[in-house]
Image: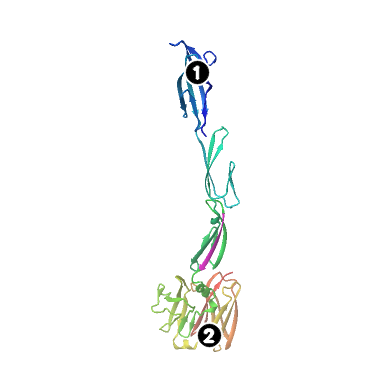
Amino acid sequence: MKKQLLPFFIFIIAGMLPIASKAQSSRGCVLTYTQSLTVCFGDNIIVGTHTYNTSSTYSDTLTAVSGCDSIVTTNLTVRAPIQTTQGFAPCSMSVHITVGTHVHTTNGFYHDTLVAASGCDSIVHTHLQYYISSLYHDQYISICPGDSFAVGNHFYSTNGAHIDTLATFRYGCDSLVTTHIDVLGSTLIDAFQNISTCSCGIYGSSTHYYAQNISYQWIDCNNGFAAVPGDTLPDVVPTVGNVTYNYAVVVSLNGCADTSDCVPVILLGINEQNAAVNELTAYPNPASDNITLEFYTTAEQPLNISIVNVLGASVYGSDETYPVGANKLLIPVNGISNGVYMVKISDGNSAVVKRVVVNH
């Protein structure tokens, strides 16, 4: 709001104001007067016929009612405009922003004029932005078996919906994040972990690993893990007898892959078709205290039962004769370190092998 100030010196009468001084002129006298004024930005003052609205020192010659000249010196100070910029990012629509007599409740830019303590206008610029939509977020993540996905300080590696409450870095609002994890090829991992549901050993003349909807590639652990040409089925059939094979299988599903442990297999010719032991199962798997072996023998004869680690070192061994039919053996594993092992039952001519995990 602009104002015009009319200084009282417009009505100066010679000799009446003690702050004015006079001197002789061609008309008989000269009056001088000095004043200092401060106004708000946008206001102005009038001295005689002149209007001023910027800070400076002005000199005006006026004619008093006595006919004498009056020289008026004005030191004018114009206060700088008072402008304030502020921003708010509430996390709740229940938060209202009040500026003077105005209350703002929606997103936008607002400009409010207030009266400052100096009496001048103060303009307040307000940017209001609610961030309610950022509080809830769903994300869908696919990972390979064995991988994990980080949300805040949490790492997720299993199928399902995982909920985290995070503090948004920029706005300080709590964000509720729901992460939907899809482990690609999870049935592949289930097959490896639940090893009792699949066959992994020698039956007659083949080594076998089976799970549905999975691609296979057998590799030779004795040959730099090279792929065995043409062996891309659940069964691999060695072609030469009396040779020690060491095979593993790479199984893939949905772009993810995992590799079994190497399985040692010794083929000893035609007698392997008449294996004395078959149908070997081991449970629980993983095992913590004891592991139970169940197997079926076709002939009563001495059997060697051993547990070896992935380096081929034996951690358990026994030699006993078992009767024909179903047999069960309880083996303590609480003294065996955590890891992956192979349980092997051999009659001297053929062997069956089962992969087990010890996890205390």
Q: The C terminus is located in which quarter?
A: bottom right
Dominant SS of magenta comes to strand
Residue 147 in view (yes/no): no
Write the start and end of the magenta stretch as one range: 174-182
Colouring scheme, one of rainbow, by chain, secondary structure, one colour: rainbow
Q: Residue at label 1?
A: 33
Q: Quadrant of residue 232?
A: bottom left
- The relative height of residue 84 versus residue 300 in the rendered view (above or below) is above
Q: The residue under label 1 is which amino acid type?
A: Tyr
Going by the image, does 217 lie left or right of 295?
Answer: left
Distance (Cα) linking label 1 and label 2: 126 Å
| Residue in the foreground of this view, choosing between 245 and 254 | 254
Q: Position of residue 132 (x, y in %)?
A: 56, 55
Residue under label 2: 277
Q: Residues within 10 Å of mark 1 (few under 14, many from 20)?
A: some
Q: Say which amino acid is labelled 2.
A: Val
Which mark, residue 146?
A: none
Element at label 1? strand
Quadrant for residue 307, please give it: bottom right
**Mark 1 or mark 2: which is in front?**
1
Give residue 175's position: percent from left, percent from top: 56, 56
Quadrant in the rendering for residue 220: bottom left
